[in-house]
Structure formats: structure tokens, C-alpha cells
Amino acid sequence: MSSSCGVKVICRFRPMNQREKTEVLTNVPEWNLNFIDESGLEVTLGKSHYTFTFDRIFDSDSKQDDVYNLSARPTIDDVLEGYNGTIFAYGQSGSGKTFTMFGPDKPFPEPLKGIIPRASQHIFEHIEEDEKSSYAIKCSFLEIYKENIRDLLSPNSGGTKDYLKVRESPTRGVWVDGLTSEFATCEQDIDDLIALGDNSRSVSATQMNARSSRSHSIFIITIEQKAEDGSTKTGKLNLVDLAGSEKIAKTGATGETLEEAKKINQSLSALGKCINALTTAKAHIPYRESKLTRILQESL
């Protein structure tokens, strides 16, 4: 693979909005954020100092292209070599996860394209340049809403009878039973599938975000290759837009939105446990604690 490390953590900052600037000036009169280098930063809050280290840090002036090339491109290259890979955006509600993964609402200029449309472009450019292999690209799009799995490429679904189940077998591994799988022959096909699925996602307004994702979405690209000698290899890419972690006091969530927030935080906690177990080489990885980690089990 392109890296000896299976898990990388990259931190991206977005500019503060006016509300956040007002809150900081009112509630945190003495604060400072210092980028030490490309992987380290120091946060000062009054007399307290905190230092954080990541695999890479992007400040609020970072460009979508830079984020893709340094954080996502190596994973796409690995998938094209037949490995499984996952890229996901994690952070609090309103932190810019969907913008990073998808980009702004269409139409948008080329520089603002997010990781998912750039990955699509990257894959089909590779296929066009490879004259010695044949390819089949299949795509699926699902959301996990309150620990229930919905097929986003089946717009008429939505009732409890349409919730999908995770299956597992020794020969096939882990899969979502009944999930739609569509062939894609060009970038536009993938763009159309993303648009179809995005229109069906569960969203609502909170004090932190006017269009807050209330579910985790996973766009799955499976790449099957056959070489001239008849050998085959398959790579699966999971592109995940996580629902934002939430502090109820900040989002003002009540009623159904509050119940959504509880489920969101529970599944994010389960994901954190799995990542921690993987990075510390623990014998048991708690994949079964949430639907999200079960589905991503073979690609984390």
C-alpha cells in the first residue's frame, strides 16, 4: 500500500462565522490558535495551553484540491490496487464535513469540488489511461438513521419495512442485504447517483447548522478489474459523511431532533472505540456495537 500506517487522522479548520466570533469574544477573552507546523498546533485558553499532533493539519485557508491530494488520493490509489479503503469526515455539527466530502450545493466551480467528486474523476482518469485491464464500477449509497439502514438509491423506500439488515458469511464477508448496486461508466453517472441519494437524506435545522445531517451516509464504490492474463482484483472504497457530534446545549435539540442526536453520539462513540482498538493493536475490535462499524468492518 502507499503507506505503512493503516489509519491517518487529518485535521481541517474552517473560518469562523460571525456568531462564533461573537461567542469567542464574549466567552473566551484570551485565546490563541498557533499552527506550529504541518502536523502540530497549540491552543491557548487563558492561562491553559494545549498541544495537538495530527498526521496533517489544514488551516482555514486550505483549498479543496490540497485536502484531496494529501489526504484522499493515496487511499484511492490503494483501492485501484485492489485494497479496501475508507475516508470519512468526523467533527461537530456545522464544522464543514459535508462541504469537504461533497462540496457546496450545485452548481459549483471546479475548485470547490469535494473529495467524493474528485475521487470519481481520479478513478475514471486512471481507467482511461489503463489500456491493459477491463473495469466494472458499481456504486451504492446508504444512510444510517437512528441505527436503521436506508437505501438512498431507492427513493420510494423509507418505512420501517424498507430498513436493510447487515449480513455476514465466511465466504462473502460483511454486506448490506438488499442494497441497490448501480453500474457507473463515467463521472456523470456517479454525480447523478450522488444527487439522487442526497435528495433522500435525513436533515433538519439546529442552532449550529441550518441543514444538519441527521444520519451517517456511506457512498460505496466497488472497482472490479480484469487483467489481460485473466487475473482479477477488487477494491472497495467507502466515502463517509458522518453526522456531526453534538452538544445538546449548543444545538438546542429537542423532541425528535434530540433522539436523533443521542443515536448520532452513540454511534460516533462506537466508531471511536474501534479506531482506538485498531491503533493500539487490541485483540478485540468492537465492530458489532453499531451498524456503522459493522458495515465498515472490512475497510477500517
Image (cartoon, helix red, strand yellow):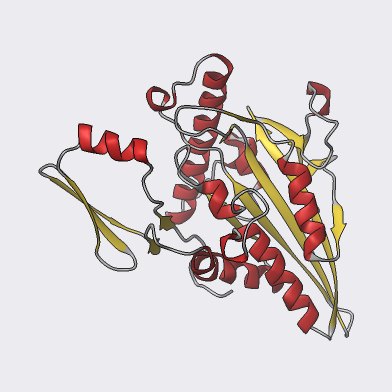
Q: In the picture provided, is 146 more to the left or to the right than 24?
A: right
Which residue appears at 47% of the width and 39% of the height?
94
The quarter of the rendered structure image containing the N terminus is: bottom right
Residue 162 seen anywhere in this rendered image of the structure: yes
Q: Please state the horizontal and vertical placement of residue 274, each as a whole percent of the image.
A: 51, 45
The quarter of the rendered structure image containing the C terminus is: bottom right
Residue sticking out furthest to the top: 255
Residue sticking out furthest to the left: 47
Q: Quadrant of residue 267?
A: top right
Which residue appears at 72% of the width and 70% of the height?
123
Given residues 207 and 259, the one toward you in this image is 207
Q: Please state the horizontal and vertical placement of residue 151, each as a whole percent of the image.
A: 78, 38
Given residues 266 and 172, the one toward you in this image is 266
Is 146 drawn above or below residue 213 in the view shown? above
Is 97 drawn above or below residue 228 in the view shown? above
Q: How many marks?
A: 0
Which residue appears at 62% of the width and 65% of the height?
110
Q: Please state the horizontal and vertical placement of residue 196, each as a whole percent of the image.
A: 78, 44
Q: Quadrant of residue 229?
A: bottom right
Q: Quadrant of residue 207?
A: top left
Is 208 drawn above or below residue 58 in the view shown? above
Q: Please state the horizontal and vertical placement of residue 210, each as a whole percent of the image.
A: 53, 32
Which residue appears at 84% of the width and 80% of the height?
133
Is 92 drawn above or below residue 33 in the view shown? above
Q: In the picture provided, is 66 more to the left or to the right than 23?
A: right
Residue 44 seen anywhere in this rendered image of the structure: no
